Image (spheres, rainbow, N blue to C red):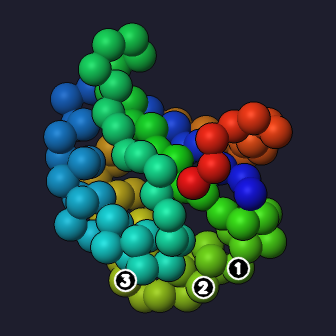
Amino acid sequence: MIVDLRTYTVKPGKLAAYVKLYEEKGWPLQQKYLGTCLGWYTVAEGTLNTVVHMWQYESQADRETRRATMAKDPAWGEFLKATAEAGYLVKQENVFLAPTSFSPKR
């Protein structure tokens, strides 16, 4: 198992608009194609204007297959286009995490 930890920095003042756009257009598609979301959060204290979400996959190959399938869906392209046109995102980071032997299992 791996976890894809994704961190997005949003332009100040645009967090609510980005979350709304994602909830309406991105979330349904990612639930359909990506599988297990371990959490989707906005930062309340610390580095503000930040969104963090985590997705669980069986392996890197599982992740690549699922994301490639999602990328073929025209609705995903529409979501990416809407996000780009709105100019909400400043930065994106991805980190892949592997569980330790004592990590709780999901």
- Residue at screen point 33% across, 65% down: 27
Q: Which kind of residue does numbered mark 1 sit on?
A: Thr
- Residue at screen point 38% across, 46% down: 40
Proximity of marks 1 and 2: CB atoms separated by less than 8 Å:
yes
Q: Earlier in the sequence, mark 1 or mark 3?
A: 1
List the residue tagged with mark 3: 75
Say few, some or many: other residues with alpha carbon within 10 Å of mark 1 (under 14 / 14 to 19 / 20 or more).
some
- Residue at screen point 75% across, 42% down: 99
Assign the C terminus to one quadrant of the image. Answer: bottom right
Q: Which kind of residue does numbered mark 3 sit on?
A: Ala
- Measured as percent of width and height from the top left, residue 52 is found at 45, 38
In this rendering, would 32 be left or right of 57? left
Assign the N terminus to one quadrant of the image. Answer: bottom right
- Measured as percent of width and height from the top left, residue 46 is found at 39, 11
Q: Which mark is residue 65?
A: 1
List the residue tagged with mark 2: 69
Helix, strand or loop at disc 3? helix
Q: Which kind of residue does numbered mark 2 sit on?
A: Thr
- Residue at screen point 22% across, 37% down: 14
- Measured as percent of width and height from the top left, residue 49 is found at 33, 27
- Measured as percent of width and height from the top left, residue 22 is found at 29, 58
